[in-house]
Amino acid sequence: MAKPKRRYVCQACGGVSTRWQGQCPDCGEWNTLAEEAPQTVFSAKHDLSSGGRPIQFTPLDQPGEMPRRRASGLAEFDRALGGGLVPGSAILMGGDPGIGKSTLLLQVSAHIARQTQGGGGGLSVYVSGEEAAGQVRLRAERLGLSNAPIQLAAATSVRDILTTLGMMDPPALLVIDSIQTMHSDQIEGAPGTVSQVRGCAFELIRYAKENGVTLVLVGHVTKDGNIAGPRVLEHMVDVVMSFEGERSHQYRILRSLKNRFGPVDEIGVFAMEGNGLAEVGNPSMLFLSGREEPMAGSAVFPAVEGTRPVLVEIQALIVRLQSGATPRRAVVGWDSGRLAMLLAVLEARCGLSFSSAEVYLNVAGGYRLSDPAADLAVAAALVSALGDKPLATDAVWFGEVSLAGEIRPVAHASIRQRESAKLGFARAFGPAGGAPPEKGLRFDGLTMLPNLVDRILSDA
């Protein structure tokens, strides 16, 4: 029998190497290769065409019972999931430390558990691998959830967890906080390694699928904000969610990155308060507060997250330099590369000069924008700040800017206008020839970026 070859697995990306080296050849991280237990070499004489148990097929064209979603008690959480919790689904939730993942899941668990008392729900099991049961009780008491009949446990062994769950009725919700702390005695390696995370997640997901349990796995994140562990973990689950926000800001955004049961890029907005996370039904009012007086460099952009429009304020500041120092470009909440491209277009196509000035751009409230339709709003804020000309307080701006200075059409123009009109805005500037104007909203179509500059800097 051939001697099993050694293999080294990167703890950051899951890449496999036949020898140890300081730097991973796949992702470039240093000191992340760890030896994995050798596996038995698979021989061609192993035949899997017999000896198994037959599986049952279900015709797709015949009517069958569809899984019914379960309300979590938080409408914003259900919105991000696409309508509620699906029985038998596996959800992976990531986020920065201290952002409120455990608080949110404890509130959801309490609602599911309280439904049991009313006869409309099931058991809610919360397994913490990072905190003792007493610490979770303290947080529940602070949130006013100490009377919720949640089945609480502090454990890290997947064998112990599954054995205990097998002795009771399957719960409606199972929360594992977090998957990096779980370990299996069948796999060598410390908790948190690639093999342990992959193996523990597979066993928990299999239990959830077989028993119709909604499983929520809390995952750690790297310094870049990505979910830690192998990328195969994101492929194994049904839903991947990211809990975003700045600790210095009150709001939190729950974003759906992958969803097999609903739309992707849906968001739920929460506000961190003393008694937990509170839902924000109208996030536009949260990001637009404090705009009573007109100010140069401020433009309102109607963003669309999934099917939800959110109006945010974009702020720009231009500081002229007297000396020959290198001007600085600082961006918060937007792509710095796209800002550099937009500044180049304004200089080349519109004759504006930003080379001797420092440019600061900020999305109010700590909101992060990735929508290309924000180009026109950013350009309007920059031109307004450069000319010290305040924009109309009742106007919104949206449109994509090309390198030729054209203002290109964007998706969901009617949704953006409808939300703007609902919040009291009277004018909208966007690509010409787009969606028909919304009732009560005056739409001004723009074709080229110089038209925008002339409109803002003109004295009319």
Image (spheres, rainbow, N blue to C red):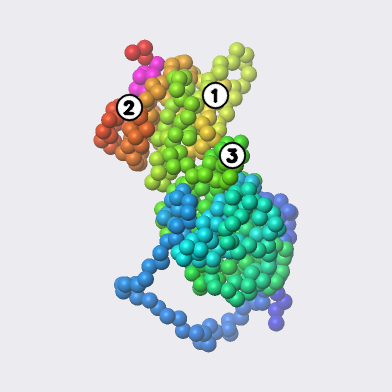
Q: Is residue 374 left or right of residue 35?
A: left
Picture coordinates of residue 39 (x, y %)?
Answer: 67, 73
Give the foreground label among 3 and 1. 3
Does 337 appear above or below 78? above
Q: Earlier in the sequence, mark 3 or mark 2?
A: 3
Q: Is residue 212 left or right of residue 246?
A: left
Q: Residue at x 52, y 52 (%)?
A: 241
Q: Earlier in the sequence, mark 3 or mark 1?
A: 3
Q: Secondary structure at mark 1?
A: strand
Give the labeled residue for mark 1.
359
Q: Residue at x 65, y 59 (%)?
A: 128
Q: Which residues are magenta?
A: 450-457
Residue 22 found in image quarter: bottom right
Picture coordinates of residue 400 (x, y %)?
Answer: 39, 34
Q: Magenta segment: does it hold 454?
A: yes
Give the labeled residue for mark 3.
246
The amino acid type of the residue labelled 3 equals: Glu
Seen from the viewer's position, the closer of residues 138 and 176 is 138
Picture coordinates of residue 171 (x, y %)?
Answer: 54, 68
